[in-house]
Amino acid sequence: MATVLDVTTTGLRVRFTGSDRLAACCAGLDVPFERIVGSRVMTRDDAVASSPRLPCPGSWWPGTLRAGSWGVGERRQLWSVRRGAYVVVVYLSGRPFHRVVVDVADPYQSHRRLEAALLHSKKTSPRRALRDRLPPRLDDGVDPTGRR
């Protein structure tokens, strides 16, 4: 496999190597646990059926390869899948991707390892909503300067 899925102490690291790096037009992605909503193992056909049809930029060959960015805006996904029957799907919050789909040697073990690390991170570090990190909007009744 030319895709490496590593669970680190702070999040998930997805690395593309070799020809997958060229096909995906991307070196990979580092995702902190705060952005990870969850993961699951799906069949390749189910994952393809629930994804956008527009590669931008991406590469595909029917039944053989699907790599790179697919879709735009909120539905944008990062793929690196070859002929594997089962893939790991990681759901994310925020941008640039809402879903990462990868083909790894043992998808069930990768899924279990990611879910265990995600659960551990939720128990050991406080969670804050992404909304708390944004500056207040002018139309919500709060003056951004702090004056009333």
Image (cartoon, helix red, strand yellow):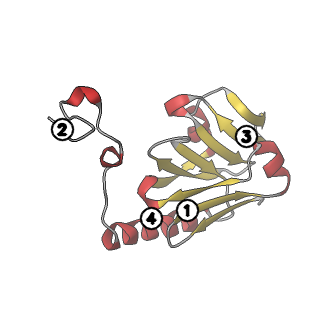
Q: Which quadrant of the structure image shows residue 120?
A: bottom left
Mark 2 vs 4, N-terminal side:
4
The C terminus lies in quadrant: top left
Measured as percent of width and height from the top left, residue 92 is found at 47, 48
Position of residue 104 relative to residue 80, above or below, is below
Callout 2: SS: loop
Instruction: Say which residue appears at 31% left-offset and 50% top-offset.
Output: 129
Q: Are marks 4 and 3 in contact (CB under 8 Å)?
A: no
Q: Which quadrant of the structure image shows residue 36?
A: bottom left
| Residue where numbered disc 2 is placed | 147
Q: Closer to the camera, 30 or 82? A: 30
The single residue placed furthest to the left in the displayed view is 148
Q: Is residue 50 visible?
A: no
Q: Which mark is residue 12?
A: 1
Measured as percent of width and height from the top left, residue 76 is found at 57, 35
The N terminus lies in quadrant: bottom right
Under mark 1, the amino acid is Leu
How far is disc 3 from disc 1 in space, using C-alphas?
A: 21 Å
Q: Which quadrant of the structure image shows residue 134?
A: top left
Q: Tell me the mark number nearer the camera, choosing from 4 and 1.
A: 1
Q: Crowdedness of circle 3 by 10 Å Cα count: few (<14), some, many (20+)?
A: many
Q: Closer to the camera, 95 or 146? A: 146
Under mark 4, the amino acid is Glu
Q: Which mark is residue 115?
A: 4
How far is disc 2 from disc 1 in space, using C-alphas?
A: 41 Å
Measured as percent of width and height from the top left, residue 135 is found at 33, 41
Mark 3 vs 1, N-terminal side:
1
Position of residue 26 relative to residue 33, above or below, is above
Callout 4: SS: helix
| Residue where numbered disc 3 is placed | 66
Mark 2 vs 1, N-terminal side:
1
How far is disc 2 from disc 4 in space, using C-alphas?
A: 44 Å
